[in-house]
Amino acid sequence: MTSDAEIITYCSYESPVGSLLIGGQGGALEFLHFPESARRRFVEEGWVEDATPYGALIAQLDAYFARELEEFSLDWRLIGTDFQKSVWEQLAAIPFGETRSYGDIATALGNPGASRAVGLANNANPLPIVIPCHRVIGANGALVGFGGGLETKVWLLEHEGIAFGPGASKDQMAFSF
Protein backbone atom coordinates (compact mmCIF):
# COMPACT_ATOMS: atom_id res chain seq x y z
CA MET A 1 0.00 0.00 0.00
CA THR A 2 1.29 3.47 -0.91
CA SER A 3 1.30 6.06 1.84
CA ASP A 4 0.30 9.68 1.22
CA ALA A 5 3.96 10.69 1.63
CA GLU A 6 4.90 8.47 -1.33
CA ILE A 7 2.22 9.77 -3.70
CA ILE A 8 3.57 12.28 -6.19
CA THR A 9 1.28 15.22 -6.75
CA TYR A 10 1.86 17.42 -9.75
CA CYS A 11 0.52 20.23 -11.85
CA SER A 12 1.43 22.06 -15.02
CA TYR A 13 2.18 25.76 -15.17
CA GLU A 14 1.95 27.64 -18.45
CA SER A 15 4.85 30.08 -18.49
CA PRO A 16 6.41 32.34 -21.13
CA VAL A 17 9.13 29.66 -21.53
CA GLY A 18 6.70 26.78 -21.98
CA SER A 19 4.66 24.39 -19.88
CA LEU A 20 6.46 23.61 -16.64
CA LEU A 21 5.85 20.36 -14.76
CA ILE A 22 5.80 20.91 -11.00
CA GLY A 23 5.60 18.20 -8.39
CA GLY A 24 6.86 16.21 -5.46
CA GLN A 25 6.02 13.53 -2.96
CA GLY A 26 3.35 14.18 -0.39
CA GLY A 27 2.77 17.70 -1.72
CA ALA A 28 6.36 18.82 -1.07
CA LEU A 29 7.91 20.92 -3.81
CA GLU A 30 10.68 18.70 -5.23
CA PHE A 31 10.88 19.42 -8.94
CA LEU A 32 10.11 21.85 -11.72
CA HIS A 33 10.88 20.70 -15.26
CA PHE A 34 11.07 22.55 -18.55
CA PRO A 35 9.29 21.10 -21.58
CA GLU A 36 12.54 20.68 -23.55
CA SER A 37 14.89 19.25 -20.95
CA ALA A 38 16.99 16.12 -21.21
CA ARG A 39 16.24 15.62 -17.50
CA ARG A 40 12.50 16.24 -17.87
CA ARG A 41 10.15 13.99 -15.99
CA PHE A 42 6.88 12.87 -17.43
CA VAL A 43 3.66 12.21 -15.55
CA GLU A 44 3.65 8.59 -14.44
CA GLU A 45 0.90 6.17 -13.55
CA GLY A 46 -0.21 6.73 -9.97
CA TRP A 47 0.63 10.42 -9.87
CA VAL A 48 -2.19 12.67 -8.69
CA GLU A 49 -2.87 15.97 -10.41
CA ASP A 50 -3.33 18.57 -7.70
CA ALA A 51 -2.10 22.16 -7.88
CA THR A 52 -3.12 22.92 -4.28
CA PRO A 53 0.26 22.11 -2.66
CA TYR A 54 1.99 24.36 -5.20
CA GLY A 55 -0.18 27.46 -4.81
CA ALA A 56 2.64 29.54 -3.32
CA LEU A 57 4.99 28.58 -6.15
CA ILE A 58 2.37 29.35 -8.78
CA ALA A 59 1.67 32.76 -7.25
CA GLN A 60 5.39 33.52 -7.09
CA LEU A 61 5.97 32.33 -10.68
CA ASP A 62 3.13 34.62 -11.80
CA ALA A 63 4.79 37.53 -9.98
CA TYR A 64 8.27 36.64 -11.31
CA PHE A 65 7.09 36.52 -14.92
CA ALA A 66 5.19 39.80 -14.38
CA ARG A 67 8.48 41.36 -13.12
CA GLU A 68 6.97 41.89 -9.68
CA LEU A 69 9.15 39.33 -7.83
CA GLU A 70 12.92 39.04 -7.76
CA GLU A 71 13.46 36.42 -5.06
CA PHE A 72 11.46 33.27 -4.41
CA SER A 73 10.53 32.45 -0.84
CA LEU A 74 9.34 28.86 -0.72
CA ASP A 75 9.69 25.66 1.22
CA TRP A 76 11.11 22.83 -0.84
CA ARG A 77 12.63 19.41 -0.41
CA LEU A 78 15.83 18.93 -2.35
CA ILE A 79 16.96 15.42 -3.17
CA GLY A 80 20.64 15.19 -4.01
CA THR A 81 24.12 14.70 -2.63
CA ASP A 82 25.55 17.00 0.02
CA PHE A 83 27.76 18.59 -2.65
CA GLN A 84 24.81 19.18 -4.99
CA LYS A 85 22.83 20.75 -2.17
CA SER A 86 25.75 23.05 -1.32
CA VAL A 87 25.92 24.17 -4.96
CA TRP A 88 22.14 24.70 -5.09
CA GLU A 89 22.41 26.81 -1.92
CA GLN A 90 24.99 28.99 -3.69
CA LEU A 91 22.74 29.27 -6.74
CA ALA A 92 19.80 30.35 -4.58
CA ALA A 93 21.97 33.17 -3.22
CA ILE A 94 22.70 34.71 -6.65
CA PRO A 95 20.71 37.96 -6.70
CA PHE A 96 18.17 38.77 -9.40
CA GLY A 97 19.86 40.51 -12.33
CA GLU A 98 23.34 39.16 -11.54
CA THR A 99 25.41 36.21 -12.71
CA ARG A 100 28.19 34.06 -11.32
CA SER A 101 30.62 31.77 -13.09
CA TYR A 102 31.07 28.11 -12.26
CA GLY A 103 34.48 29.10 -10.87
CA ASP A 104 32.91 31.75 -8.63
CA ILE A 105 30.65 29.12 -7.11
CA ALA A 106 33.49 26.63 -6.72
CA THR A 107 35.54 29.30 -4.95
CA ALA A 108 32.61 30.20 -2.68
CA LEU A 109 32.46 26.51 -1.72
CA GLY A 110 36.16 26.61 -0.80
CA ASN A 111 37.25 24.46 -3.75
CA PRO A 112 38.34 26.68 -6.66
CA GLY A 113 39.24 23.66 -8.80
CA ALA A 114 35.73 22.21 -8.69
CA SER A 115 34.22 24.16 -11.61
CA ARG A 116 33.32 21.02 -13.55
CA ALA A 117 31.70 19.42 -10.48
CA VAL A 118 29.77 22.66 -9.93
CA GLY A 119 28.60 22.45 -13.54
CA LEU A 120 27.37 18.91 -13.04
CA ALA A 121 25.49 19.89 -9.87
CA ASN A 122 24.11 22.98 -11.61
CA ASN A 123 22.79 20.76 -14.39
CA ALA A 124 21.07 18.52 -11.81
CA ASN A 125 19.21 21.43 -10.18
CA PRO A 126 15.66 20.13 -9.59
CA LEU A 127 14.09 23.61 -9.27
CA PRO A 128 15.32 25.82 -12.11
CA ILE A 129 14.06 29.42 -12.12
CA VAL A 130 13.34 29.11 -8.36
CA ILE A 131 16.96 28.11 -7.72
CA PRO A 132 18.37 30.29 -10.50
CA CYS A 133 20.84 28.08 -12.35
CA HIS A 134 20.21 30.25 -15.42
CA ARG A 135 22.33 32.92 -13.70
CA VAL A 136 25.47 30.77 -14.01
CA ILE A 137 27.70 31.51 -17.00
CA GLY A 138 31.16 30.64 -18.21
CA ALA A 139 34.22 32.45 -16.87
CA ASN A 140 34.42 34.46 -20.10
CA GLY A 141 30.76 35.47 -19.85
CA ALA A 142 29.63 32.91 -22.40
CA LEU A 143 26.32 31.13 -22.12
CA VAL A 144 27.58 27.58 -21.79
CA GLY A 145 24.43 25.53 -21.73
CA PHE A 146 21.22 25.12 -19.82
CA GLY A 147 19.03 22.13 -19.08
CA GLY A 148 15.93 23.94 -20.33
CA GLY A 149 17.64 24.87 -23.59
CA LEU A 150 19.80 27.84 -24.42
CA GLU A 151 16.84 29.78 -25.83
CA THR A 152 15.13 29.52 -22.43
CA LYS A 153 18.30 30.65 -20.64
CA VAL A 154 18.55 33.66 -22.94
CA TRP A 155 14.88 34.51 -22.29
CA LEU A 156 15.34 34.31 -18.50
CA LEU A 157 18.51 36.41 -18.55
CA GLU A 158 16.89 39.05 -20.75
CA HIS A 159 13.80 39.00 -18.51
CA GLU A 160 16.08 39.88 -15.59
CA GLY A 161 17.92 42.56 -17.56
CA ILE A 162 21.19 40.64 -17.60
CA ALA A 163 23.48 41.55 -20.48
CA PHE A 164 25.46 38.78 -22.10
CA GLY A 165 29.17 38.82 -21.45
CA PRO A 166 31.96 39.04 -24.01
CA GLY A 167 31.86 36.22 -26.49
CA ALA A 168 28.34 35.22 -25.53
CA SER A 169 25.84 34.69 -28.30
CA LYS A 170 22.23 33.63 -28.49
CA ASP A 171 23.28 31.17 -31.19
CA GLN A 172 25.87 29.29 -29.14
CA MET A 173 25.49 25.56 -28.91
CA ALA A 174 24.23 24.40 -25.53
CA PHE A 175 25.73 21.32 -23.98
CA SER A 176 24.57 18.91 -21.34
CA PHE A 177 26.85 17.80 -18.54
Image (cartoon, rainbow, N blue to C red):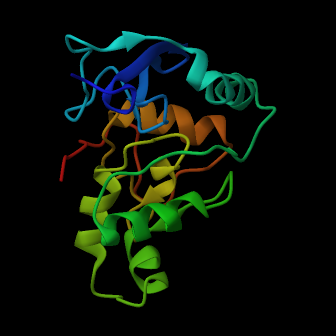
Q: Residue furthest right?
A: 68
Residue 16 lies left or right of residue 134; in this view the side is: right
Q: Is residue 68 visible?
A: yes
Question: Which image quarter: residue 95?
Answer: bottom right
Above/below status of 82 relative to 14:
below
Point out residue 124 in the picture as x, y percentages from the top left corner: 29, 50
- Name which residue lies at 20% across and 46% down: 175
**Image height of 155 relative to 147, above or below:** above
Which one is nearer the viewer's eye here, 35 or 84?
Answer: 84
Residue 68 vertical position relative to residue 127 in the rendered view, above or below = above
- How far across and down, in percent of the image, does residue 72 sit? 68, 44
Instruction: Tell me residue 43's x, y (percent).
Output: 26, 14
Q: In the rendered image, which quarter contains the N terminus?
A: top left
Q: Is residue 150 left or right of residue 58?
A: left
Residue 19 visible in the shown view: no
Quadrant in the picture for residue 127: top left
What residue occupies the far front of the structure in this picture? 1
Q: Residue at x 51, y 68 (%)?
A: 90
- Residue 131 % position (x, y): 52, 49
* Residue at the spot 64% in from the left edge and 27% down from the top edge: 61
Badge count: 0
Q: Residue at x 64, y 59 (%)?
A: 98
Foreground residue among 73 and 7: 7
Q: Quadrant of residue 87?
A: bottom left
